[in-house]
Image (cartoon, rainbow, N blue to C red):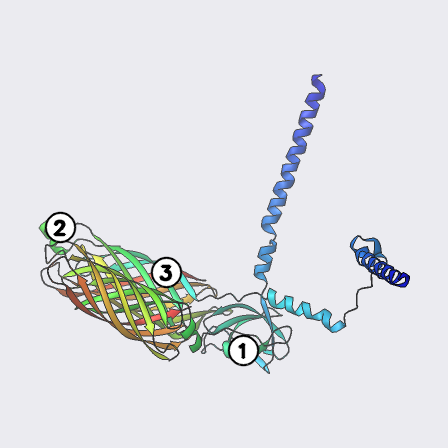
Amino acid sequence: MESRVRVLFLITAVITLSGCAATKNLFGIGDDEAPPPTAEPPGQIIDPQVERREIKEPAIDREDFEVGAFAGIMNIEDFGSDAVYGVRIAYHVTEGFFVEATLGQSEASLTSFELLSGGARLFDDRTLTYYNLNLGYNVLPGEVFVGEGRAYNTNFYLIAGLGSTKFADDDRFTVNFGAGFRFLFTDSIAFHVDFRDHLFDIDILGREKTTHNLEGTIGMTVFF
Amino acid sequence: MSEPSTTTIPSTSRSSSSAWCVCLLALALLAIAPGPAEAAERELRKVAIADPYLEMHTGPGRGFPIFHVVDRGESVEIVMQRTDWYQVRTDRGVEGWVDQAQMELTLKPDGSEVDFARATLEDFTNAKWEAGILAGDFGGANIISLYGGYSLNPHVSIEVWGSQILGNFSNGWMGSVNVVHETWPDWRFSPFFTLGAGVIHTSPKSTIIQGDDRTDQVGHVGAGLRIYATRRFVFRVEYKSYVVFTSRDENEEVAEWKAGFAFFF
């Protein structure tokens, strides 16, 4: 009986002591006795650095879009020539192909009939606005040389597309085609010279006919 | 009593003005010196050359001449990307354009291969977003359409369309929402079926008919083909049969043919 009590005592003592040993570090008493940190093999020290580098890797700046403005002269068939201005945005799909959306505006002068008849106008709103969705191809990429030490990249492109022209109170389905020259001052800034023909049907002068409306513009664009 | 106050006032004002000066100077320095964000922006991706040499062209195109060669083992920084061409800068500051095929043979600073993401047929099947431009014939009139689509899964997507209709007798616009089902989305020539509803607005041309503008509801069924061209480029051809629910006794039926191109991203 006595030995049983002694065994019980011993078990209680062992449990209490081990409990104390466990809680010792918890209260910061056993700081001095804390085991030294296990030394890592040198190979493992490098690993985290490699991972960090992968995360920090900067993204490559993509510059496939080109946006800009243009101004020039547009000849509206039967309505004289006037200033035209607009904006364009292009996306370069490959080194050859690009798609482009253009928005432009011009003003119609008086026809010979309106001038001679004196006062009688065919219609009041003389503004012409158009939009186009085009596909272009850089048919002649190249370089031009300015003096001895400078070379600039250029592109001669052909372009065609569809759109709508709002003129003489109606929207008119418009086909346009032309060619242009892109001169890159830097890799991101370009100067354009463009020549386009806008074809649309008009019946304002009696019978319906297809008109050619020629447009010549210069412009600036920025790649981003 | 007034004397100390007069002496203290200028001294305090002087100290505050000098504090302002310091602040302004600090601001000016901050404005001039690149901030941490800006410095991070200028940090460029660096790659080591694994091919025997890296050819640098004067422009982003096959025709531009090679003017500089970087040897194996040297490294270059990537300045920017345009289509399939990368502008790189050598350690000595020489800048030129390198094509994707050669860039794929470069290595990261840790020696692993560089992954230059390039859209593939797999992306054509799995891409979430798509946008495109189509044009064609809408019951004898010309039609120009823009659309944007979102894929719920490779088979089913939802598209929103906006169209301008330019006819001989009337003009108008149409907006619709479509559900598109692709039976074999992993095929290069992927056929699809579509079902949708929307609104059509027509106004007679000013010179021909004196009539009223009309806005009607439309429903349509259709079928077509999406053709993977290259990179993110898709050709698309489709036929749709529309029913215009007019306020008159009879509904109008219009057939539409369209072709165009689209991008996925």
Percent x, y for residue B208? 10, 58
Marks 1 and 3 share the same chain: no
Residue B4: percent from left, percent from top: 72, 21
The mark total stands at: 3
Judge depth for marks 2 and 1 and give the one in front: 1
Mark 2 element type:
loop
Name the mark on residue A27: none
Q: How crowded is the residue under tag 1: few (<14 C-alpha within 10 Å), some, or many (20+)? A: some
Kindly state the secondary structure of the residue where label 1 is placed: loop
Bin the neighbour count of mark 2 within 10 Å (Cα to Cα): few under 14, some 14-19, many 20 and up. few
Q: Which residue is mark 3?
A: A219
- Find the residue positioned furthest to the top: B1
Q: Is residue B239 left or right of residue A32?
A: left
Which quadrant is the N terminus of chain B positioned in?
A: top right
Q: Which mark is residue B104?
A: 1
The amino acid type found where label 3 is placed reads Gly
Q: Residue at x 46, y 65 (%)?
A: A63
Q: Are marks 3 and 2 in contact (CB under 8 Å)?
A: no
Share a chain, discs 2 and 1? no
Q: Amino acid at mark 2?
A: Arg
Q: Quadrant of residue B256?
A: bottom left
The amino acid at mark 1 is Glu
Residue B154 location (% of width, % of height): 40, 72
Under circle 3, the secondary element is strand
Using the numbered discs, state the Cα–Cα distance from disc 3 to disc 2 in whole angstroms: 33 Å
Residue A95 seen in the current view? no
